[in-house]
Amino acid sequence: MGASQTRTEHKYQDLADKTGFSLEQIENLHKRFQQLSNNEETINREHLDSIPSLANNPIRKQIIEAFFDKRNQHQDEVGSCEEIGFEQFLMVMSHFRPPSLKTTEEEKEAMRKEKLRFLFNMHDTDNDGTITLVEYRKVVEELLSKSGDIGQEAAKAIADAAMLEVASTNVPHMDPDDFYEGITFEHFEQILKGLEMETRMYIRFLDVETPTLRCGKSTS
Amino acid sequence: MPSRTGSHSPAGTGKSLPERGLLLLMVLVLLEGSVLPLGAASSPDISHQKNVDNHKVEHEKNYTKKAFPVLDLDYHHIQTPFEISLWVLLASVMKLGFHMIPRLPGIVPESCLLITVGLLVGGLIKLAGEKVPPVLDSQLFFLCLLPPIILDAGYFLPIRPFMENLGTILMFAVVGTLWNAFFIGGLLYAVCQIQPANPSELHQLEILPCLLFGSIISAVDPVAVLAVFEEIHINELLHILVFGESLLNDAVTVVLYHLFEEYSAAGTVTVLDGFLGIISFLVVSLGGILVGAIYGILTAFTSRFTSHTRVIEPLFVFVYSYMAYLSAEMFHLSGIMALIACGAVMRPYVEANISHKSHTTIKYFLKMWSSVSETLIFIFLGVATVDGPHHWNWTFVTVTVILCLVSRVIGVVGLTCVINKFRIVKLTTKDQFIVAYGGMRGAIAFSLGFLLKKEQFPMREMFLTAIITVIFFTVFVQGMTIKPLVELLAVKKKQEAKRSINEEIHTQFLDHLLTGIEDICGHYGHHHWKDKLNRFNKKYVKKCLIAGERSKEPQLIAFYHKMEMKQAIDLVESGGGVNLPSAVPSTVSMQNIQPKKPPPAKPVEKALPKMTKGREEEIRQILRSNLQKTRQRLRSYNRHTLVADPYEDGFSELLIKKQKMIELEKKIQHMNNYLTVPAAPPDSPTMCRARLASGRGTDFKPAQQQRGNKISPDPQAYSSKPAADRVPTIQVDLASPQSPDSVNLMDEFRRADQQEEDQGLMMKPPSGQSGPNRPREEDRGREQQKMTRCLSDPGPSADEEEEDEPFLP
């Protein structure tokens, strides 16, 4: 037993180095992972889909899809997979780590890029390097999908206005016959400069086990 | 000014101060409803009183038979309102004057100059040998001058950063203020005791008065902070930290003040008293918030029903908030917290309910009042300095100033050490410095000191002198040096406040994303609860408090409309909107441009004819105006800006209904077209002609082709090209260069559609499996239509525009 204990620790250490999580956090996430996957090695879309508190999230589909997106695994693969193991799960989660006290400016910059890339990938569903108007509209539509017809009506207009804004801020001098192809990553960075992603796109991962705080997964 | 004081008559001085304050209050309240300038407001009073006078005079005349007084002078009757007006006028003129002097506002903060003016005025009054009016009387200050400033701050409080940093703010406001009070009070007492060489009156000072003094002097003052921080344009985080602290420490100050005042009479404090003090703090702060929230909800609820009497809408905001303040003060709760809570609670709902004009009115009134109040406060501070009976004690004053600085620095640094353990965005040393340095003291401290009774506190004069010195020190020394220091330290400045629609989209997206990730992680964090609260708000509260369909409007859409409206207003104001209602020529050129408008995504580069910059700009302008116009018309916002005022409300309803009808009709028509004529070759010339004739041809044309493609992909696609060529050619004047574009456009659409299809299958397997094929296709078709319609949006909208014209007033 002792041997296997150290082996898991060792395994976690590997993961900790890779993802930047602490061992406790990994432990906690692993428990959650097993809870979600019904103690199996991998997790698939249905598992995530059945999380009850996620049901009301308007962008649920995108969130789940992001977990199965190979681009978020720090490898140079594209496409999506059917199921992911714990390591991939952690990899996706690692995009939501908060910056720590010790992070330097360069690290912060890298972190920001990484987080923005994650967001960008969520929007750029076909992985062609640009968020086209169609893709953007889809995003806004999903965002407003919980608000019924008004939402759907307005989504298009909003996406158009947003696209117009991106085009006009990034390519201020465009001939009327020029066409703005879509938001590239550079432009994406540009428009979200004001949001300070590195300090906002994070959640607090639990360091210590707090079973009372955990929300159970429904058995259905 | 001397002339004013020269007329100080016995009748005027006989009036007690509370009365005077009440009168000013009444004048202000009266003013609230009317848009009268301050000077004019008092004139009805005067004329009324004069009338009464004349009556009297006529009466007497009956038996004295004196000559009819053609001109009568009776200053007494108007004295109080007249003097108030004069003060306000002086304040406004001074404010005006500073910005006329070149370069001066850049060096010296306004607050310093105003205090200087106050000193000068006070000096003049004194030179004239008059008794200086006790202008900064506590009653006047707390009931009239302070509320507008706080309401302004509360109503425009940036909620999001405030809530995000609430922990830090509370820490500074509660623990920091407590620390300051006890540190200053305690050490001051110690210093007073260890002064053997000079057995002065300081030895008589007991510990409780010292602590009372400490609690008065320790609170950071919102008025002073606002005055200085408005000018240095510091970044949002620091601003909200210092400003939030200054607002929330009110409860601590109130409790400490009452506690020490109470017990300095008794002389002892027991543990029980301390415990009661803590309870009292909770009651005062939470009670204040509760009172404010109740009034806020009342305001929101009332504003639900004001759609027929728009004129008095702003009044409700002011009166309810003022009542919240007074109600809180009545129970010795924290009035400042009540006002903040009231303003913050009511704002989202009130803004959704009231008209745009009322919103502007509220905004301007709040800004006007708060800036006049602020100016008056600083001037009065100067006057009161000249006036006050001073008792200068070198030791006491210098020790106070030094202790204030030291305790502030220690407090901030110590607290940040603790706070930084919990914060994600740590406070750097620079931030700490600014927070510590920005701890201005101001008129609240002075007024509290003024409230002390001479009998109970023999050292009142000395306290007041010390308080004034500290205020002057913070306002002059710190206020004047903070700006260069901020620049020297290269503290991050405030960014352009204008939020872009993209940022809004992504803020929302991020919120949902983080909530989702938290849910997947399986523990409930901030985002989860925020989401819960939002949902509750949307589901229940908004329904109760917001009238009409705006209650269902998601935040993003609301934001979009607001932005649109702002742009539209800008446009109108810039003169572009003069010909908006009858822009028939512009709609034509619109149609020319629209198909080749950049934003719709077209990933294919093409060769293009060169256009001059000027022409391009012109086109852009026209385009934007038209986009604006149509969108605006389609939504329910025309009532605010473009439509003539008197018919505002009635017509807006009518227009909305009409728009809805048109939209619906169009949709149905599209659907019909789409469902009934699928087999017809989309490029048959007659069809084309017919559609083009209808003016909406371009809209569903590509959709038609799309559909054709879907049924039998390849041959149709190629055969449809010539038709696509023709579409713009017929419609558009500058046709020739464009035709390749449109072809590409079509291709692109097809491609996009195919991609979408793939993704669709990938992303939503359930719908693909469950739904029958036909509806899905229909859905997609509709989406396509939407898309294509968007690409050539203004076509039909322009039509609508024309159709609507007769209905416009």
Image: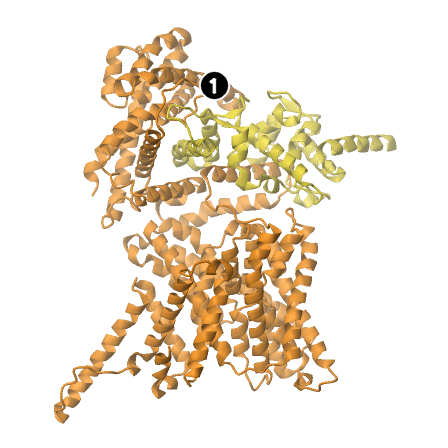
| Residue that sits furthest to the front in the current view | B102
**Does residue B805 appear in this view?**
yes
- Image spot of residue B583 (x, y percent): 24, 35
The residue at 26%/15% (across/down) is: B688
- Find the residue positioned furthest to the right: A2
Residue in the picture at 36% in, 49% down? B547
Q: Is residue B454 above or below residue B633?
A: below
Report the residue marked by disc 1: B757
Residue B542 rendering spot, x and y as whole percentages = 43, 48
Q: Residue A200 at what x, y percent from top left?
A: 59, 42
Q: Along the horizontal axis of the image, is B147 left or right of B200?
A: left
Most extreme residue toward the top, as rendered?
B715
Q: Is residue B546 visible?
A: no
Q: Amino acid at mark 1?
A: Glu
Closest to the observer, B619 or B256: B619
Which tint is chain B? orange
Q: Residues within 10 Å of mark 1 (few under 14, many from 20)?
A: some
**Quadrant of the image occupied by residue B460:** bottom right
> In the rendering, at what x and y percent does residue B255 appear?
58, 70
Chain letter for mark 1, please.
Answer: B
The residue lying toward the viewer, choosing from B334 and B96, is B96
